Amino acid sequence: MKEKNILQPGISLHRSTIRYLLGRRKNKVNKGINSFSYILGVHGAIVRNSKLLFSLLFLSLALPTTVSAHRGATNEVDTCRFSVGSEVIHFSAYTPTFSGGTSYCHGVPNIGLTHLVFDYEGNKLRHTTVEFEITKEPEGTRIFYHAPEKIKKGTIDAKIDFAKYGAGDYLAHVTIVYQGEKLDSHLPFSIGVEPEDAGVPKVIIILLVLVITIIVGMLVMSKFKAKKAAASDEID
């Protein structure tokens, strides 16, 4: 009977030890499963948000180029149209010596011999007396003048060597003369001056992308800490 009493505590201790070890192993397995699930969740979050970040980055690179195309870049069309009364004239500037057949509008980057071409888009102006003038601003100094006449072909090509007048802002004046009355229209443009980009600056868009990246990183880290704390509680 004494031997049985002596051996019984040892058996109970052995069983409790086994249960403890099995419990720890089970916790480790659960922890491993949770960690693997978390890794998959983080990977999915990174993939989902990376698409958004890449989209914003692409937008930040593409947006300035798109905007500058409406401020005097090459092959500009729509923004070079202006109204003269009820009619429309298309304006194009060419610098054959520097850029061949490339056309400009509100901003001509090179200073030299420039062809300023005014094209009538309708037929009414062909039968109307029209006067053309180019002045340098803000002084208002006249550098080109075409006396009033009816331009039957619907196009006038003003050849001006801007090297004589220098870089700066200029103004094209188109005046309709009808029955002794005049109707003026104006189109501003610059020579040798790079136009400023309109819209959202690239720096702001890049900063926006960085802020979103930081926010995504903080969300991922907060989820990691929360799951890590939950795993610790399960072990305890």
Image (tube, helix red, strand yellow):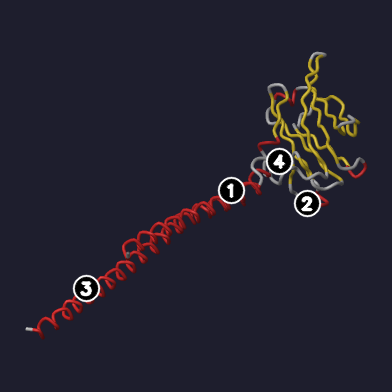
Residues at marks 1 and 3, CA–CA distance in whole angstroms: 54 Å
Q: Is residue 217 above or below residue 4?
A: above
Which numbered disc flags the more N-terminal residue, 2 or 1? 2
Q: Nearer the viewer, residue 45 or 31?
A: 31
Which numbered disc flags the more N-terminal residue, 3 or 2? 3
Residue in the image at 38% along x and 62% along y: 38
Instruction: Check contact, mark 3 vs mark 2: CB within 8 A.
Output: no
Nearer mark to the viewer, of 1 and 4: 1
Q: Amino acid at mark 2?
A: Ser
Report the residue marked by disc 3: 19
Nearer mark to the viewer, of 2 and 4: 4
For residue 208, the mark is: 1
Q: Is residue 4 above or below residue 134?
A: below
Which numbered disc flags the more N-terminal residue, 4 or 3? 3
Q: Is residue 16 above or below residue 122?
A: below
Q: Is residue 146 left or right of residue 54?
A: right
Q: How crowded is the residue under tag 3: few (<14 C-alpha within 10 Å), some, or many (20+)?
A: few
Report the residue marked by disc 2: 99
Q: Position of residue 158 (x, y in %)?
A: 83, 37
For residue 71, the mark is: 4
Q: Amino acid at mark 1?
A: Leu
Secondary structure, mark 3, is: helix
Q: Nearer the viewer, residue 21 or 9?
A: 9
Residue positioned most to the bottom? 3
Q: How crowded is the residue under tag 1: few (<14 C-alpha within 10 Å), some, or many (20+)?
A: some
